[in-house]
C-alpha cells in the first residue's frame, strides 16, 4: 500500500488559521479597550468586579484550557506507551503534532498567569489582608507568589521538555528498520521517557496545578477532587481534539491505515472519560451538598442557585447526557460524521466547563457571557487559530506514520 | 433429541482456518459451529453470524433498573413514608443517584448474564455434545451439518484440501438435553466412523 507520507497544509487551512487569529487579535484589542482597561474603583459598568478581572480571567481560562488539552495529547501518547499499546501507532504522529503546541501555549499561559498574579486582585490570597485571615494564614505555605512562580515555571517547562523528549525519540522510528535488539531498546527508552512524563503529569495536572491556578481563586474554598476534575475535563477534550484531527486527515486522504477500528477506540476513550468526568462532577457536588457546610457550599451557590445555573446544568447535558446516549452505540463510535459532531460538542462543552469554573469564581454574581460573549469567542478563535497553524506545521514536518516503529503492525491489523 | 450426522474437520492454525471457513460457506455447506480453544477475533464475521443483540438487552435492563430505583425511592420518600433527614428536601435526588446507579448496574448485569446463558443454552444439567476434546486445548474444530444428499467423501476431501489435519463423520445430538454425559453418551469415545443411518 502506498502511503502519502507527508501532510501538506492546504492554503485554505492556512487562511482559516490566520483569519481566526486576526479575529482573536481584534477581540483582544477591543476587549482590552472595553473591558480590560477598567482597573476597579468606580462603577465597573454595572458589574461588581473590575473589567480587568474579567479580561484577564477570560484570557486565563482560554489559555489554560488549550494548554491542558494539547498537553493531554502527550499524556495520551505516554499512557498508551506505558500500557504497551500498539493500536494508536496509526495516528500517534497526530497526537504528537498536537502536543508540539505545549511550549507555545505554555509561554502564553505563563505570561497571562503572571499578569493575573501580580497585576490584578483575582487571587485573594495574594493581598495584604490574607496574612490576617485565619483560614488563608494556614494556606500561605502553598499559596504564595514565590511558590506559584517556581511551580508554574517548573510545570510548564517540564511538560515541554519531557514532551519534546518523547517526540525526539519517536523520530528515531523514521530512520530505518529496527532489528529485534534495537527495537527492544527503543521501546524501553520510550517507556522510561513516558514514565517520567506521567509522574510529572500526575504531580501537576493530577494534583497541584489546578489547585494553584484555578481553585485558589476561591481562596477559602477547597476540594480535593478539583484537580482530577480538571484532568478528566481536559483529557476527554484532548481525545476529542485528536479525533477531529484524525478524521480531518482521513477525509483529506491521509492516514491510510486508520480505519473504523481506530476511530472506535478513540470513541471509547471519549465515551469512558465523559463518564469519568461526570463521576467526579457528581462526587464533588454530592459530598458538598450532603454535608451542607457553608464554607464548602460557597462554590456551588452561584452555580446551582445563582446566575450560573443555566450554564452549570447545560454543561452536564452536553458533557454527560449527550456522550452517554449518543456514543453508547457501537455504530456511532464507528461513524465519522457522528464522531466529528460529538468531538466538537465535547470540546465546546469542556471549554464552557472551564468558563464556569474560572469566570464563575471571578464574577460570581454576573454571567459575563451576557455582555462579553464576543470576547470569549474571539479569544477562543485566537487559540484555535494558533492551534490549527501549529498542528498543521508540525504535521507537515514529519512523516505521518512512524514506519519503522516495532508496534506499527499491531496497529495495521488492529481489530476491536 | 434429534440426532444428525456431522462432518468434523480439525485445524491447528488460525491462518488456515479462516480461508477454510470462507470456502466452506461459499461452497454452500452448512456450518454447524467452529469450536476454538480461545476467542478468535473476526471468526464470527467469517462464519457469517449476525451481531449479538446482547448489548441492546443490557441497555433495556439498565433503563429498567434506573426507573425501578427512581420510582421506588421517590415514592417511598415523598409519598409513602416521608422522613426528615438532616433537613434535606424529601425529593433528595443527589443522595439517590448512587443507589439509582447501583440498581442500574445490578439489573443490567444480572439480566445480561441470564440472557447470555439463555442464548448460549447454558444451565446446570444442560448438556451438549462435545465433538472433540482438544477443542479446549490446541485444535480448531469445524463442524459441518450434513443432509442425506451430502456426499460425505467429497466433503471430507474438500476439508482436507483446505488444510484440515483430520476429518471424520459423527452422528450426534445437535441441540441440548438434560442429563448426564456418563449415562447418556460416553464422552470423547464415539469418534468411530459410523455408518449412515437412513
Image (cartoon, grey):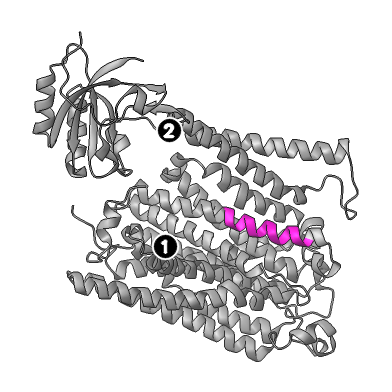
> Of discs 1 and 2, which sits in the foreground?
2
Given the image, what chain letter belongs to the residue carrying mark 1? A
Q: Is residue A10 visible?
A: no
Q: Position of residue A272 (x, y in %)?
A: 52, 53
Relative vertical location of residue B141 with respect to residue A348 in this rendering, above or below: above
The residues bearing labels 1 and 2 have C-alpha atoms spaced at a distance of 47 Å
Image coordinates of residue A416 in percent, x first then y, are 37, 47
Depth order, front residue of A103/B178:
B178
Q: Which residues are magenta?
A: A275-288
- The residue pinned by badge 2 equals B52
Chain letter of the residue carrying label 2? B
As drawn, the residue found furthest toward the top would be: B198
Q: Which residue lies at the image location 81% right of the left edge and 48% below the top edge?
A: B92
Residue A139 among magenta residues: no
Q: Secondary structure at mark 2?
A: loop
The residue at 60%/80% (across/down) is A112
Q: Quarter-wise, where is residue B13 in the image?
A: top left
Q: Secondary structure at mark 1?
A: helix
Please name the residue shown 39% across and 78% down the image.
A164
Question: Toward which corner of the image does residue A287 lie, by quadrant?
Answer: bottom right
Magenta span: chief secondary structure = helix
Amino acid at each position: 500500500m502506498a502511503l502519502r507520507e507527508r501532510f501538506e497544509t492546504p492554503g485554505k487551512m492556512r487562511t482559516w488559521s490566520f483569519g481566526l487569529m486576526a479575529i482573536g487579535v481584534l477581540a483582544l484589542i477591543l476587549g482590552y479597550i472595553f473591558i480590560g482597561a477598567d482597573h476597579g474603583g468606580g462603577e465597573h459598568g454595572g458589574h461588581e468586579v473590575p473589567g480587568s478581572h474579567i479580561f484577564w480571567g477570560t484570557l486565563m481560562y482560554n489559555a489554560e484550557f488549550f494548554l491542558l488539552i494539547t498537553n493531554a495529547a502527550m499524556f495520551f501518547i505516554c499512557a498508551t506507551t506505558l500500557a504497551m499499546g500498539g493500536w494508536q501507532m496509526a495516528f500517534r504522529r497526530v497526537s504528537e503534532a498536537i502536543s508540539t503546541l505545549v511550549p507555545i501555549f505554555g509561554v502564553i499561559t505563563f505570561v497571562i498567569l503572571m499578569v493575573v498574579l501580580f497585576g490584578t486582585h483575582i487571587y485573594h490570597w495574594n493581598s495584604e489582608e490574607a496574612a490576617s485571615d485565619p483560614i488563608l494564614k494556614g494556606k500561605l505555605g502553598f499559596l504564595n507568589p514565590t511558590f506559584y512562580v517556581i511551580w508554574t515555571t517548573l510545570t510548564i517547562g517540564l511538560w515541554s521538555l519531557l514532551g519534546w523528549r518523547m517526540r525526539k525519540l519517536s523520530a528515531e522510528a523514521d530512520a530505518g528498520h529496527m532489528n529485534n535488539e534495537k527495537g527492544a531498546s527503543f521501546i524501553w527508552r520510550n517507556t522510561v521517557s513516558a514514565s517520567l512524563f506521567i509522574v510529572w503529569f500526575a504531580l501537576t495536572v493530577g494534583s497541584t496545578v489546578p489547585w494553584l491556578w484555578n481553585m485558589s481563586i476561591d481562596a477559602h474554598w477547597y476540594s480535593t477532587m478539583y484537580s482530577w476534575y480538571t484532568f478528566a475535563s481536559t483529557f476527554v477534550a484532548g481525545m476529542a481534539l485528536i479525533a477531529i484531527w484524525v478524521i480531518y486527515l482521513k477525509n483529506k486522504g491521509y492516514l491510510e491505515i486508520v480505519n473504523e477500528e481506530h476511530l472506535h477506540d478513540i470513541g471509547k476513550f471519549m465515551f469512558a472519560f465523559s463518564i469519568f468526568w461526570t463521576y467526579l462532577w457528581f462526587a464533588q457536588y454530592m459530598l458538598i451538598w450532603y454535608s451542607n457546610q457553608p464554607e464548602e457550599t460557597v462554590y456551588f451557590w452561584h452555580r446551582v442557585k445563582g446566575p450560573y445555573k443555566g450554564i452549570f446544568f447545560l454543561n452536564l447535558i452536553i458533557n454527560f447526557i449527550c456522550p452517554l446516549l449518543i456514543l453508547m452505540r457501537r455504530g456511532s463510535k464507528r461513524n465519522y460524521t457522528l464522531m466529528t459532531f460529538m468531538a466538537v460538542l465535547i470540546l465546546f462543552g469542556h471549554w464552557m466547563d472551564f468558563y464556569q469554573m474560572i469566570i464563575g469564581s471571578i464574577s460570581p454574581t454576573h454571567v459575563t457571557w451576557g455582555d462579553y460573549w464576543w470576547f470569549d469567542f474571539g479569544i477562543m478563535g485566537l487559540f484555535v487559530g494558533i492551534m490549527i497553524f501549529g498542528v498543521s506545521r508540525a504535521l507537515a514536518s514529519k512523516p505521518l506514520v512512524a514506519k519503522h516503529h516495532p508496534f506499527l503492525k499491531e496497529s495495521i491489523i488492529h481489530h476491536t | 433429541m434429534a440426532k444428525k450426522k456431522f462432518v468434523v474437520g480439525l485445524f491447528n492454525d488460525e491462518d488456515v482456518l479462516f480461508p477454510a471457513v470462507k470456502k466452506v460457506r461459499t461452497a454452500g455447506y452448512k456450518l454447524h459451529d467452529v469450536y476454538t480453544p480461545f476467542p478468535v477475533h473476526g471468526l464470527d464475521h467469517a462464519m457469517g453470524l449476525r451481531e449479538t443483540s446482547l448489548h441492546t438487552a443490557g441497555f433495556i435492563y439498565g433503563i429498567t433498573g434506573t426507573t425501578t430505583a427512581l420510582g421506588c425511592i421517590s415514592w417511598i420518600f415523598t409519598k409513602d413514608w416521608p422522613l426528615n433527614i438532616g433537613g434535606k428536601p424529601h425529593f433528595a435526588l443527589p443522595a439517590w443517584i448512587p443507589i439509582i446507579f447501583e440498581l442500574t448496574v445490578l439489573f443490567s448485569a444480572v439480566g445480561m448474564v441470564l440472557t447470555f446463558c439463555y442464548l448460549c443454552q447454558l444451565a446446570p444439567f444442560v448438556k451438549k455434545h462435545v465433538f472433540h476434546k482438544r477443542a479446549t486445548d490446541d485444535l480448531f474444530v469445524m463442524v459441518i451439518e450434513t443432509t442425506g444428499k451430502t456426499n460425505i467423501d467429497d466433503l471430507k476431501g474438500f476439508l482436507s484440501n483446505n488444510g484440515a489435519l483430520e476429518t471424520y463423520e459423527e452422528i450426534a445430538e445437535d441441540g441440548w438435553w438434560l442429563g448426564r454425559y456418563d449415562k447418556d453418551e460416553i464422552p470423547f469415545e464415539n469418534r468411530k466412523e459410523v455408518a449412515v443411518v437412513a
